Amino acid sequence: MHTIVVDADGRGQLSTGTIAVLAGASNAELKPVRVADGTQAFMFESHFMLTVTPWAAETCGKVQPDYYKVWQDLKSNFTGPASGSA
């Protein structure tokens, strides 16, 4: 079992180790795998509009405005539908 951690080096690029893990996961045999022993996940629904507070977006200092750049060098493996199909 692999833990996929998305990390960035000082230049804002995916590290070689992260790319190798992503490639390995992308090429692995598709079969059920047990993950997350000892953890808990949850989901909730609401009819209310959920938004990020100004504190969360600006004041807390946790937002990474350039985070999207981490993914710029990741090779796309998606080609879209074959031409003529709809």
Image (cartoon, rainbow, N blue to C red):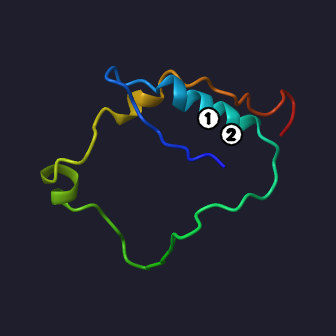
Query: At 84% across and 29% down in the image, what residue appears?
Result: 82
Q: Which is more toward the observer, 79 or 12?
A: 12
Q: Which is more toward the observer, 65 or 39?
A: 39
Query: At 44% across and 79% down in the image, what residue appears?
Result: 46
Q: Is residue 3 left or right of residue 69?
A: right
Q: Is residue 65 above or below residue 55?
A: above
Mark-to-mark CA distance, 1 and 2: 5 Å
Count of marks placed on residues: 2
What residue type is disc 2 on? Ala
Q: Is residue 3 above or below residue 71?
A: below
Q: Is residue 40 left or right of residue 33?
A: left
Q: Which residue is mark 2?
A: 25
Q: Which residue is mark 1?
A: 22
Please tell me whether mark 1 sits on a helix, a strand or a loop.
helix
Near mark 1 (Cα within 10 A), the count class, few <14, some 14-19 or many ≥20, is some
Q: Is residue 69 above or below residue 3?
A: above
Q: Is residue 62 left or right of residue 27?
A: left
Q: Can you name the residue that lies furthest to the left here?
A: 59
Please tell me whether mark 2 sits on a helix, a strand or a loop.
helix
What residue type is disc 1 on? Leu
Q: Are marks 1 and 2 in contact (CB under 8 Å)?
A: yes
